[in-house]
Every structure is written in structure tokens, then in C-alpha cells.
Amino acid sequence: MTLVACWILLPLVLGALALGCGLLLETIAGRRLPGVLLAPAGLAVIVVAAQFAVANDHTAEFATPLVIALAVAGFALGVPGRARSVDPWALGAAVGVYAIFAAPVVLSGEATFAGYIKLDDTATWLAITDRVMDHGRSLDGLGPSTYEVTLQSYLSNGYPVGSFLPLGIAHTLTGEDSAWLFQPYISFLAAMMALALYALAGSVVRTPWLRAVVAFLAAQPAILFGYSLWGGVKEIAGAWILVTVAALLAPVVLSVKDRLELRTLIAPAVGCAATLAILSVAGAAWVAPSLLLALGILIVTRGVREVVLPVLMFTVLGAILSIPPLLYASAFLDVGNQVLRSDSELGNLIEPLRGLQVLGIWPVGDFRFDPTNLDATYVLLGILMVAGVAGLVFASLKRAWGPLLYFAGAAVGVLVATQLGSPWVDGKAMTTASPAFVLLGLLGAAAILERSPSLEVRLVGGVAVAAIAGGLLWSNALAYREVTLAPHDRFAELEDIGHQIAGQGPTLMTDYEPYGVRHFLRDAEPEGASEFRRRQIPLKGGRILDKLEVADIDEFQLSSILVYRSLVLRRSATASRPPSVYRLVSSSRNYELWQRSEIAAEPPGKAIIQHLPLGNTVEPTVVPRCRDVLRLARRAGPQGRLATVERPAAVVIDLASIPFPPSWRTVALSQSALLPVTDGSIDNQVDLPRGGHYGFWMGGAFRRNLELIVDGQRVSSERQQLSHAGHYVPMGDARLSKGVHGLVLKYGDGGLRPGTRGEAFPIGPLVVSLTTADSPVRYVPSSDASSLCGKRLDWIEALRS
């Protein structure tokens, strides 16, 4: 139900609000907006209005009621006497774009989002959205946590929040977690951009169906689509608002007979304010060229006297509407200067992107790399550039100011950004500008197809449209096949745990999972051991985990663990049980929640004199030396006790040591893992020392379907199980007798599902175990410590009497 609810409810809710706010803007402006611009312009109203509400802690929660009130007022004031028909071609273009951007997630069959593993910025965007909708930029009341550090790094430093506000409103109204709404929201922004592109294309292309084709294609440049699969919400929002500003400016420039007054300029002023809300003061570099070109046209057509006063009033109105981002502009630029300007700042890029990528055709699954077929790519880009020149000529001859205003802003904006910014900023700038270059090429090709009196020339135009369309769709099909999707089931577990332990922090996660500590567990003071943190969480020996590192709970210093009331740990057969003061509260497929009881007037763990960890990263148990057991007993004293966890040994199957397909490769950093670069299977046997109910755990991560067959019976079939290194995927369980059993692992059969191609992840080892960390604690008097000698144990604790 969540999948359907998110992808249908979000566009309905935001679409209705945007339409109502667009009608209100039209009423206030005193002039009829093109019907296709009502929703895109109304979305700009939502951004501008909501940013004022969230500017203060006391008013932040009124952002959604304010937007609802504006939309209701728009419907009440705008509908009577102003009924208009729906343009089915414009609607078709918007729905088609929404479907294209939705496909990589919707066709997976789960409500999730893209970009997992590749870039964790989406976790930060969710954290910001969560906070600003209730408290604005205020961090008051937040305890020390990774969540708090993340917000401190962004909100306190003036990071623009405009692109997140409609998402927060949709979350409030639908009740769905913003994580599941994130990708529908990005797709909705792309659809709004398609409507604005349709409006701009109308000044050059007369035929509605051809205009719809132009808008549908121009809304999906490869780099923009690629960033949408990275969680690039600000880039998509920036692309939408730049098109919308140009489309709102065009009628002002064209209406030569109407008197130029402030009401006439309200709509573009709202668009410019929304640009600054989304991009901060950097947005000025994008809208200034369009505004200057519009000013020049107005001066030529109307004269200086008629233009000066309205322009001054427009500037004042725009500044008033942009007060929130202007107040934080200095702080944002100061803090971001290193990222914004450093030539060495690549972010998550591998190397600087090619400048040609701004043209929108780049047929490769990951836009950070060059296409394998560069010759075909250059041919398609050449066609697009020639068509773009034709588009400039046609637009200039017809005085189609909308496309020219848009291209001026996009071209100058990306030029300034790439000259002054870091490679990381360059990529974002090219993404934001890319629809303008694709639009110009399509306008040129479509105009030739539509207007040329010669059949042969029209055929050339048709071939150019088809070539550009083929290049765009080819590029995005490859990106669709290599998308990395977040694990819905695992995150849904974190969502449930977050509700369960709200207010019961502090909480620790020992694995690197930014979506847990920055979003799902936010109300329980979450800390990630390998994330940004307020507390030091040292391992034994004093070392601190690096980012992306994973450590077992037994590897940390006991004192650094016991400050946490709640532990949210990945479940696996190789994980150690937490110290004895913690009890298991809940266990699901992927996560366990452990909590310690609050003991009044006594520090947690005071009864623990020493905690002796045993085992290693693959096998959590070992038979300790008897002298170590007796030494702990002496430390506990005659009246003390030993606490321990007795567990049978797991069976660890080294995949690299058994026959595997010749196309697969071993992994240099792990002797027990394989890299399955193609479809294939492994046959093996496992000898179990005793009968019982066994669980199967596969180390690593994988994209395509991985099927486990035991003794001819399928035990599990999993796909799209992505995770950072060092974790295990549960692969089902079966009751097996003592002795030898046949195992078959089949990998492949990705079909046409999203994310079935691209980079392969290592898998292995395969662990077969009777137990997990959910094992009972056994207490033994010090006098009976020798009974533990020869037993396989997880850890031992010496306890005071």
C-alpha cells in the first residue's frame, strides 16, 4: 500500500496545493497566467510562503496550514468566471516525465529511493526536512547526537531549505515517511518542469503534440536524470524554477500594449524569490542574466521612463520575498567557500565531469564515467548542437523571448559556476542548466520539421528529433539499469524502531547507516560509531572508527558503550551479544533493539568489573583459556559472579575456496569473498555437526537475484540487497539434520528490473549458524568458574556481588 500511496498521493496533494496557489498568484497579479503555468508557478508560491513560516521555531509548524489557506483562497477567488480547459498534451507530457523519473523505483515494486551506497546526501536532506517543518532552523532541545551534528553543519550555517519544504508539507498531509515520498517528490518536480517547458516551447512550436514531445524530452537530460538517481533534489528543483521564471517573465516582455506596473511583475518576482530560497544567493547568478535581458527588451520596446519605476518596485518586492535566504547568505557562503571554490573538491565524483555533459546526452549507466561508445555519443551531440543553433535562430526570428530568456540564464549561470566553482559545484551547475540546451536543440529540430516547405528538409528535422530522443532515452535506460536502490524492508524496520524508542536515547548504531542516525532514529538521540558524532566511541586500544567502517559491539571499549540506553544493531550470525546489562527488546529480520534498564542513583554497568570479548569478526565464539576464566573469577571475588553467553560454533563457507564460475573473480581484500560479475551458480556441500534449526547468512551485497537451494529445496531468493561492506544478508532458515547437505547458490536473472546491471559487489562468506546474538546470558558463581572451561563462549564478564 505504501508504494501506491506515495506515488499517487504526493502528486495529487502537491498538485492540488500548487494549482490553488497558482490561481491565487494569478488573481493577485491581475492577469491570466497560461494554464500550464498555474501549477509550476503555484509551487513557487508554496516555497516562498513556507520559507517565511519555517524561519522561526514558533511559526514553523504553521507552514502547512499557511499553504493550505493560500490554496483554498486561490480556488475560492480564482475559479468563478475563470474556468479553462485542460491541455491534454501538456498533461500528457507532465505525466510521461513523472513516469520516466518514477520508473527506477516503481518498477522495483517497493516504496524506496535511489542513490543508496553511491551518495548519502539524501539522509541529510531528510534530516533537514524533518527538523525545519517543526522547529525551523532552531536546534534547541536536541541532545548530543549524529542527528544534531548533521543539522548543526547545515541549518546553523545558512544552507538553503527551499527545495525541501514541499516535501515536508507532503509528509505532513499524507502521513507517509518523507523517505518514501522523496523519489515521488523529485519526479513531481520534473513533471512541473515539463509543464513550464511546454509553455516555453509554444512560442516556437505550434503543433500541440510536437510541443508535448519537446517538453517531454527536454525534461530528461541524462545528467539531470542521473542526479535524480543520486538524490539531487536541489538540482532538480533548481532546474524547475529556472524554467518557470523564464516562462513567467516572457508574458511581461511580450505584452507591449499593456501598461507595465507592479502587479504585472508579481509572478516573476515570486519565481525569483523561490530561486533564492532553493539555491541561496547563488541563485542570483542564474536569474540575473534573464532579468537583464528582459530589462533590455523592455527598455527598447517601452522606453526608459515607463520601465524604471516598475523595475525598482520589482527589485524591492523580490528582496522582501527573499528575506529568509538573504539573512543567511553570508553564513552559507563563508562556510561553503572551500567546497564552492576549491579545485580539488570532487565530492562523490571520481574526476571532474566533461563539459559536454551539459548537453544532456551521455549514454552510460553512471554519469561519472565516459560512455563506452564515444563515437556514437559525439555524433548525437553534434546533431543536438547543430539543432540548437537552429533553435536560437528560430527563436530570435520569431521573438520567442521565453526560450531566449531561459537559455540566457542557464548558459551564463553555468558558465559562471564552472569558472568559479569546484568540480563538485560544476557538476551541479551543469545538471541545473542542462534542460535549456536540450530544449534549444529540440526547438530547432521541431521547427524544421513543422515549418519547412520542403519534404526533404522536414525529414531532416524529423531525423534530428528522433536522434536527440534516442540519445536521451538510451542514456536514461542505461542509468535505470545501474540504479542503486535503498532497502525498503530494512529501513522500514528502522522506522518502526524509531517510533518505538522515541525519547529513550541516547542510542548507538555500530554500523555505518546514515539513514538510521540522521533520519529514522532522530527522536532517540542517535549516534553512529562511524558517523559525525558528539561523543567519542573508541574501540579497544583507543582507535576511532573511520567513516564506512563496521565494528562488532565487542570491539568497543565497555565504558563507551554503556552510556547508551538503546543499541540498534545489525542482526547476523557473526555478531556478539551486547553486555549483560542490555536486554533484547525486539528483533526483526535485519535489526535488533537492545536496551538497558535505568538504575536510579547507580551508573549503568557499575556491577561489571571486566568484560572479556572472545571470537573474531567471522566467528563470535571461542573456547577461552581456562586460566583466563579463573582470573576473571578471582577479580569478581568469592561472592561475585561470572556472566557469559554460550553459543555453538558457526559453519563458515569460504566461497573463494570452492569451484566458482570462471567469469567470477576473487576479492583481494577478502579471501572468502567473490565478485559475481555475471550470472552463474555454485554447488557445494556443508557438513553440520548437529541437527537443528539453522539460519543462513550471506556476507556482502548483491544486485541481481541470489537464490539459495539446500538439498534441492529453495530456502531463500533475494535481490537488490545493497549494504555497506562488512554486513550479512539473511538468506532464510531450515531445519536440518546432522551430516552432509547439498548447497546451491544461483546468481542472476535480473531481467528488466531496475538496478540489475552495473558495478558488482563482493559476496561471501556464507555462514550457517544455529544462533545469533539473541542468546541467553548464563550466570555462574565465582566458585564454579571452572565449569566454563572447555565451553565455547561469546564473552565473559566478571560481576560484583
Image: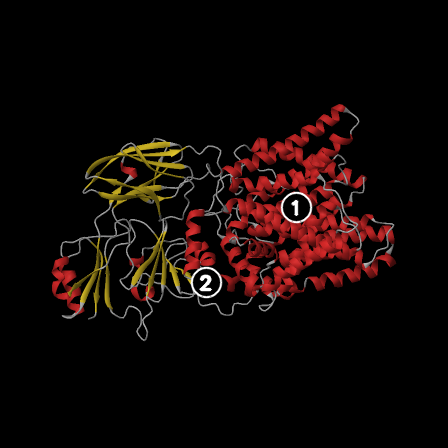
- State left or right for residue 582 relative to residue 132: left
Chosen colour scheme:
secondary structure
Q: Amino acid at mark 2?
A: Asp
Residue at 54% over, 47% down: 5
- Relative to 213, 164 lies left or right: left
Give the x, y percent position of residue 470: 61, 32
Label ID, residue 437: none
**Is tag 1's residue or tag 2's residue first in the polypeptide sequence?**
1
Judge left or right: residue 309 versus residue 718. right
Q: Secondary structure at mark 2?
A: helix
Q: Is residue 789 visible?
A: yes
Q: Disc 1 or disc 2, which is closer to the eye? A: 2
**Mark 1 = which residue?**
193
Residue 203 at x, y = what percent?
A: 77, 41
Provide the residue designation for mark 2: 523
Q: Position of residue 690 (x, y in %)?
A: 18, 43
